[in-house]
Amino acid sequence: MAGAIIPNDWDGSTYQCYKVQWPSSEQWGAILLGQITEPTVEAYWEPASGNPADAVQAVLTSEAQTEPEFYVEDCNDMTEHTHPRGEVTSRILNLALPSAQALSDGIWQKVNFEVQTAFGAPHFWDDTNHKQVVTLTDYVGVWNYSGGVFVTSAPTTLSVGLYVNGSISHFTQATGQRGVYFRWNVFVLEDAEIEVRALAQGLSPSIQSEYWLSYLDINMLSEVYN
C-alpha cells in the first residue's frame, strides 16, 4: 500500500508481540507474510509523513528479532472471546449517516455517523459527538475501520481521513469521483478519541453537495493485554 502514513507515536525502541487469527492455508500464509514484509520497502511509505528509511529500519529490526517461521496456536475462538476482566469483546459496529450533512469546500469536516447496528458490546462510540473513545481501561489492540463516504456531485478530489486524538492517522483519496471507499487497520495502544473526517476540494458552487449514503464499520481484530 504505497502512501502509508509513518507512525509518529513510537518511542523508537519498544517492540511487542501480536497474535492474529488468519485463514489456514499455504497461500493465505504467504499473503500474511507479504503484508508483514511490505513495509520494509521505502516506496510503501508516504515521504511527507516522515522519514521512510527510519520506518523501514524499524520494521527490519522487528523482523530480525522474530522467528522466521510462523507458530500456529489455538486462537481460542478469537471471533468472540472473553477478556481477562471477564467482559466479552465487541465484534462489529455498523454506523451510517442517516440524514444529509452539508459539505463545505476545502475544509476537513467530521462525518456525523450514528449507530445503526451493534453486534456485541461495548464499542465505546460517543453518539452525541460522533466519535469513538477508547481508554486504557477498555480494549486496546487492533481495530479495523472500513466504509465509504459519498457526495451528491463529484468534486475535483474527495479525501476521507481517520483522525486519532486530533491528528490524521490514515487517509484515502479519489479524484473526480462521487465517493471514496476505505479500509484501515489501526493499532490503538493508548487513550484515543477516533473520528472520520472528509475533505472535498473543487465543489461546484451551483450544486448543494451533501454526504450521501455514507457508512462505517468498526471491528476489533485483536486485543493487546497489558
Image (spheres, rainbow, N blue to C red):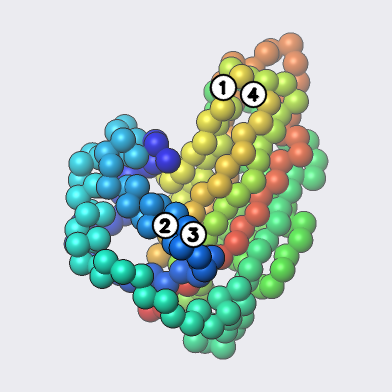
Q: Is residue 108 visible?
A: no
Type of amino acid at the residue the image marks with label 4 = Gln
Give the crowd class for mark 3: few <14, some 14-19, many >=20 residues within 10 Å: few
* Closer to us: 223 or 60: 60
> Residue 103: percent from the left, percent from the top?
67, 28
Residue at image mark 1: 175
Quadrant location, the C terminus: bottom left
Quadrant location, the N terminus: top left
Relative to 110, is 71 on the left or the right?
left
Type of amino acid at the residue the image marks with label 1 = Thr
- Label 4 vs label 3, nearer the camera: 3
Residue at image mark 4: 177
Give the crowd class for mark 1: few <14, some 14-19, many >=20 residues within 10 Å: some
- Per the model, the C-alpha gap separating discs 1 and 4 is 5 Å
* Closer to us: 41 or 209: 41
Residue at image mark 2: 30
Q: Which mark is residue 28?
A: 3
Element on which disc 2 rests: helix
- Per the model, the C-alpha gap separating discs 3 and 2 is 5 Å
- Label 1 vs label 3, nearer the camera: 3
Of callouts 1 and 2, the N-terminal one? 2
Residue 71: which quarter of the image?
bottom left
Q: Is residue 143 above or below residue 37?
A: below
